[in-house]
Image: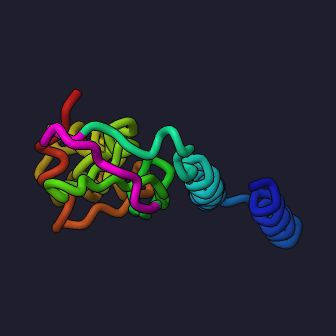
């Protein structure tokens, strides 16, 4: 994280020495972008769940059977820091074949590709303006790209 910021600062200071000017707007946006990338990388590391311990490899299934750990599965999500990858345990019931991701429930990302923070921002932007304008607000103010395909349903369906 520090290396990317140091490199960016080096470029900024070199340009300032060369021109005698500082484009504060450009510096702010570049710094925000670099810090978002660094934060997203750190968050991705935090969201790498381990294989469950032997005594945690089964959990109750709604069908009254036990679901068993199958494997770790990845899921991309958009967070306030940018795109991240979550790797979490997947459990399957041998009786009804229902799959479960307990970590998705824990993180409040079940059946969505957006973090709670992004959903909150979407809901706020969606309250203030039509979707296209709200999507543009998300891009300009938060540096997040929301697609027309996924953005509208999640902003209207936000809880909390």
At a point 13% along the width and 42% down the height, the residue shown is 63
Q: On the picture, is 100 further left or further right than 133?
A: right
Determine whether 84 is above or below 62 in the image. below
Where's residue 155, x and y in %? 18, 46
On the image, the x and y values in percent for residue 151 come to: 20, 57
Residue sitting at x 28%, y 58%: 136
Quadrant holding the C terminus: top left
Q: Is residue 66 magenta?
A: yes
Task: Decide which of 107, 23 is in the foreground and name it.
Answer: 107
Point 56% across, 55% down: residue: 44
The residue depicted at 54 percent of the width and 45 percent of the height is 54
In which quadrant of the rendered image does the N terminus lie?
bottom right
Which span is picked out in magenta?
61-71
Nearest to the observer: residue 32 or residue 47:
47
Report the number of discs: 0
Colouring chosen for the image of the structure? rainbow
Residue 62 found in image quarter: top left
Quadrant of the image occupied by residue 64: top left
Could you tell me residue 48's position as x and y percent? 56, 53
Quarter where residue 147 is shown:
bottom left
Would you say residue 136 sits in the magenta stretch?
A: no
Residue 93 coordinates in the image, percent (x, y) = 24, 53
- Judge whether residue 121 can be spotted in this image: yes
């Amino acid at each position: 994280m520090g290396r990317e910021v140091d490199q960016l600062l080096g470029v900024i200071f070199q340009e300032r020495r060369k021109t005698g000017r500082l484009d504060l707007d450009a510096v702010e946006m570049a710094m925000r972008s670099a810090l978002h990338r660094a934060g997203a990388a750190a968050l991705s590391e935090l969201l790498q769940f381990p294989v469950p311990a032997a005594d945690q490899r089964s959990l109750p299934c709604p069908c009254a059977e036990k679901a068993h750990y199958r494997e770790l599965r990845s899921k991309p999500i958009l967070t306030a820091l940018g795109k991240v990858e979550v790797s979490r345990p997947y459990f399957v019931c041998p009786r009804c074949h229902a799959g479960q991701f307990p970590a998705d429930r824990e993180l409040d990302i079940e059946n969505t590709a957006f973090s709670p923070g992004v959903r909150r921002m979407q809901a706020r932007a969606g309250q203030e303006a039509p979707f296209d304008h709200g999507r543009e607000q998300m891009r300009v103010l938060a540096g997040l790209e929301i697609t027309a395909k996924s953005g509208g349903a999640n902003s209207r369906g936000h809880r909390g």
